[in-house]
Image (spheres, rainbow, N blue to C red):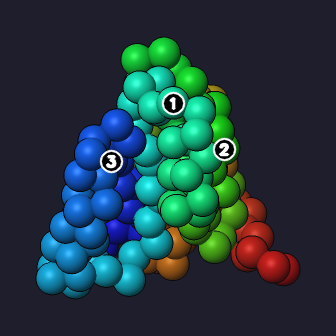
């Protein structure tokens, strides 16, 4: 299940409110209505100053961007960095080269912070969830839980 939905809407559309409502309705119908959402108002370069203020007020917490000009992209990246949940356990592991499938799994299902290839294996520093931790437990060299 997704942990965050990035909902991109056309800020210049005359039907913006209806489009946002329609997407949110479908998300509710498919059981994703409770997943945190970052609303991204794209094409902000096509919206005038007073309309931008109105949109910012109406969609408080949204991020305005222009894929064309790059305006607002840094703010979007910062918002996403803050919104994406980080797995709860930070680990350092040494994975033998024969088990590179585990490194691939960490890239797919965890948050890999650093990788070094040394000697007979790959050193990985990552944030992992409990399921991933169980899969790599025998290779863990250090572990720190969030809040500990």
What residue is drawn where x is 35% and y is 47%? 8
Q: Which residue is farthest top?
A: 69
Q: Quadrant of residue 131?
A: bottom left
Distance, label 3 to label 1, CA atoms, is: 17 Å
Q: Are marks 2 and 1 in contact (CB under 8 Å)?
A: no
SS of the residue at dot 3? strand
Q: Residues within 10 Å of mark 2 (few under 14, many from 20)?
A: few
Report if residue 95 is visible in the image.
no
SS of the residue at dot 1? loop
Find residue 121 and report its horizontal and vertical position in percent.
54, 38
Question: Of the numbered discs in the image, which one, if any, rests on residue 48?
Answer: 1
Q: Residues within 10 Å of mark 1 (few under 14, many from 20)?
A: few
Quadrant of the rendering where the N terminus is positioned: bottom left
Q: Which residue is farthest front?
A: 50
Q: Is residue 137 left or right of residue 105?
A: right
Distance, label 3 to label 2, CA atoms, is: 19 Å
What residue is drawn where x is 72% and y is 68%? 143
Question: Of the numbered discs in the image, which one, if any, rests on residue 3?
Answer: none
| Residue position for label 3 | 9
| Residue position for label 2 | 78
Q: Is residue 64 left or right of residue 37?
A: right
Find residue 96 and report its horizontal and vertical position in percent.
48, 45
Distance, label 2 to label 1, CA atoms, is: 24 Å
């Amino acid at each position: 299940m997704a942990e965050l939905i990035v909902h991109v809407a056309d800020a210049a559309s005359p039907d913006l409110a209806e489009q946002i409502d329609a997407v949110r309705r479908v998300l509710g119908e498919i059981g994703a209505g409770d997943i945190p959402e970052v609303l991204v108002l794209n094409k902000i370069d096509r919206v005038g100053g007073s309309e931008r203020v109105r949109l910012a007020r109406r969609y408080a917490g949204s991020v305005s961007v222009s894929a064309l000009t790059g305006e607002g992209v840094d703010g979007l990246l910062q918002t996403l960095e803050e919104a994406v949940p980080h797995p709860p356990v930070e680990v350092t592991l040494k994975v033998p080269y024969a088990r590179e499938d585990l490194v691939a799994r960490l890239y797919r299902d965890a948050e890999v912070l650093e990788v070094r290839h040394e000697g007979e294996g790959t050193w990985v520093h990552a944030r992992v969830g409990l399921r991933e931790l169980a899969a790599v437990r025998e290779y863990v060299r250090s572990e720190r839980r969030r809040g500990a």
